[in-house]
Image (spheres, rainbow, N blue to C red):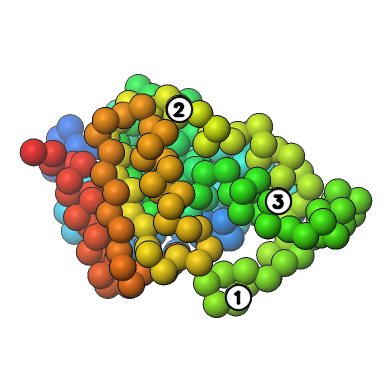
Amino acid sequence: MMFHIKGKAISYKSYSNKTLQNIPTIVFLGGFMSNKNSTKATFLFNFCQKNDISFVCFDYRGHGESSGTMLEGTISGWLEDSLDVIDNLTTGEIILVGSSMGGWLSLLATIARPERVRAIIGIASSPDFTENLIWKKLTSAQQKELMEKNMVEIIGGDKEEYRYIFTKDLIIDGRKNCIMNGKIPINKPVILLHGYQDKTVPFDISLKIAELLESEGVKLLLSKNSNHRMSSEHDLKMLEFAIQTVLFPL
């Protein structure tokens, strides 16, 4: 399905519950260069259908089937996409499930719409990754190339299987959205899932998020043998446990 707003077309998948009342909608925010048909998005879509829970996942601009290009993408733009989906495709309370970059956007969206969010589940969350995991990891030559040519290409991923092109706009805009330099003003239940073997986003970032969140209701589940993808059967069972925990707290 396609959602048109502000001159952009956002591709999304959704499910509306048929019988359950007062159950929050689960909104999935994917990672950088991911899409609504990823393993985790598909798992959540099927889980919500099976359990009659409303669900929405979507492609940011420049991702999947949505309009735009990756080279035009910024954190502010993808946050706007997320808020447009929340504001126009959901009602009532929501649970934000954010993977990698989506974990950053989940925090930013909660700050922007605190009255809508019941809880957050972060999967290998990567707030401030444009600064701490891209810019600061570049060599001085790569930083110069990015500033002078407006983009730089690097190889990444747990097994160095991806070629990424990062733009100057992405880096500069990311600095406007950084939230790891002080207390994160969120007082919601938060569950953070992270893989001990994550070579893309170190697990100590989730430890830092837990420390900085104002909320006292923060849990961190660290999986010894999981990598950044967190898409194995074991990882998906962890995700299901996290959803059950925030949906039906003791």
For disc 1, the neighbor class at 10 Å (few under 14, some 14 to 19, many from 20) is few
Mark in front: 2 vs 1: 2
Q: Which residue is mark 2?
A: 183
x and y percent of residue 152 in the render? 79, 60
Distance of label 1 from label 3 (alpha carbons)? 18 Å
x and y percent of residue 184 in the render? 44, 29
Distance of label 2 from label 1 (alpha carbons)? 33 Å
Rendered residue at 65%/46% (across/down)? 131
Quarter occupied by residue 69: bottom right
**162 left or right of 47?**
right
**242 left or right of 192?**
left
Q: Amino acid at mark 2?
A: Lys
Of marks 2 and 3, which one's residue comes earlier in the chain? 3
- Name of the residue lying farthest toward the left: 250
- Name of the residue lying farthest toward the right: 148
Residue 135 tag number: 3
Question: Are the residues at dot 2 and dot 3 in contact (C-beta closer than 8 Å)?
Answer: no
Question: Are the residues at dot 1 and dot 3 in contact (C-beta closer than 8 Å)?
Answer: no
Q: Measured along the vertical axis of the image, is residue 119 above or below residue 145?
A: above
Rendered residue at 61%/54% (across/down)? 133
- Name of the residue lying farthest toward the top: 115
Q: Measured along the vertical axis of the image, is residue 184 above or below residue 158?
A: above
Q: Which residue is mark 1?
A: 160
For disc 3, the neighbor class at 10 Å (few under 14, some 14 to 19, many from 20) is some
